[in-house]
Amino acid sequence: MKPVEGTILTVIKAAAAKAKEISAETSDDVVFWEEVCNESENVLAQTTEMLPQLKKAGVVDAGGKGLAIIFRAMLDVFRGGAVAEPENPQVQDTSLESFRNAVSEYDDEINYTYCTEFMVEKKEKCPDVFMLRAFLETIGDCVVVVDDEQIIKVHVHTDDPGKAIQKALEFGHFINDPRPKIENMRIQHENKIKEAKAAEEGYSPAAPEKEFGFVAVAAGHGLEAMFTDLGVDVVVKGGQTMNPSTDDILRAILRTPASTVFVLPNNKNIIMAAEQAVKLTDRKVCVLQTRTIPQGIAAMLAFDESLSLSDNRLNMTKALEKVSTGLVTFAARDSEFEGHQIKEGEILALDNGKLSFTERDINKAAYKLTKKLAKGEASYVTLIHGADVTSENAEELQKFMQSKFGDRLEVMLVNGGQPVYYYIISVE
């Protein structure tokens, strides 16, 4: 059986075929309709195997299940039961807003990214609308298709809204009002969680007490203390392999007692989460494009309280762009990176985010990397050693490097206490 038929359409076809077969054998309406119900339910049970989405979820087709329930209700009437009447009959609301409310119950479980809704005015020779629903079930879930003589209303969760829209054009044309709606449910879900947590915890933002405030992302007791000493109000714990969420950064922004908040992500993978947090607060927020800890430190050192937001943004950005960053870490497994064959346990030296070379000795790797970064007009080197480097080894490296560079470079040492990286090297 073709996948596109593994839906309510299959149940309908089975019911119709059984009706045709049994009509020649009996004139008893109850017996006739009971056989139709039984056949519909037999085929309905098989729909779990007809579509990958249904098989994965372990459920039968929702539309087919609804149809089987309707058939059973009709059988009850044929047996003498009464037709149920609503206590307070109301005029049906056919607006798109009503349609959205009806399907909103599906929006909590996110298997696909985009919630797609649209209305199509039927063409003169419109194909069977069940075929549209069947197709949508092959590219998504939470499919609802409702139609009347003129309009088709569609709701579907899918990773490819374009395919849903393209298929709908076979049945009619889109109308101008309302226009199709495509929303990223994962972002919506994240926002809902944020709102729920805030309500649950009774969280209230800090009242602004000054014009400028700062949020920085860092991991390690030494780095956290360094940013605090530089004037950062809230340090969010995070960094490589432990990226904070948008909610974490948003809460830090709201805890900052300032009208304008600078955010320093200090990692390229955190910039997007920080920028997303900006949209969720009514405070004025400036996300600086700091991709490393040294860039974040340089930006803080360039801040001038007497200047405006725009002047500080410009000066801090210029400062961070002048910093070169070296990272010394380790390979957790055998791999290949940018043409380099890497063995587990090797020491990796990264030059501004790109793998430069591998080594077997940590201090030797740090010196070679610093020597490479310090070409040109560099004057300062800051060695930030991590939690896995002893103070003795770090001090030994500092003395060695100072003897090699002489008066050309000043080498400073900081105990950052950071995980993952043996050394974070700042060259200015």
Image (cartoon, rainbow, N blue to C red):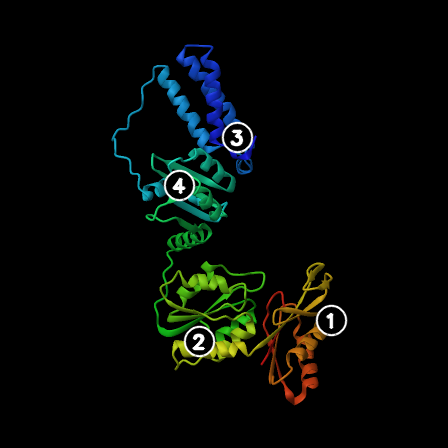
Labels 2 and 4: the sequence-earlier one:
4
- The CA span between labels 2 and 3 is 59 Å
Which of labels 4 and 3 is toward the front? Answer: 4
Q: Which residue is mark 4?
A: 172
From the image, state whether disc 1 or disc 4 is nearer to you.
4
Residue 312: name its quadrant: bottom left
**The N terminus - image quarter:** top right
Relative image position of residue 242 (x, y in whole percent): 56, 60
Task: Work out how far the residue at label 4 is from the one at label 3, CA to CA, in angstroms.
Answer: 28 Å
Question: Where does the image place residue 137, in percent across and percent down from the top left?
Answer: 49, 38
| Image-based side of 355 in relation to 182, left or right | right
Q: Quadrant of the C terminus?
A: bottom right
The disc labelled 2 sits on which kind of residue?
Arg
Identify the disc placed on residue 384.
none
What label sits on residue 47 in the rendered view? 3
For the residue pair 184 and 216, the one nearer the viewer reads as: 184
Q: Between label 2 and label 4, give the one nearer the viewer.
A: 4
What's the residue at 50%, 73% (across, down)?
227
Q: Earlier in the sequence, mark 3 or mark 1?
A: 3
Would you name the residue on which mark 2 appears? 313
Instruction: Say what amino acid the circle numbered 1 marks.
Output: Asp
- Tag 1 residue: 361
Q: CA distance from mark 3 to mark 1?
A: 61 Å
Mark 2 touches mark 4? (CB < 8 Å): no
The residue carrying pointer 1 sits among few (fewer than 14), some (14 to 19) or many (20 or more) residues within 10 Å by Cα, namely few
Q: Residue at x 46, y 51 (%)?
A: 186
Circles 2 and 1 in contact, beta carbons < 8 Å: no
Q: In this rendering, does residue 172 appear at all?
A: yes
Task: Name the amino acid, label 3.
Answer: Thr
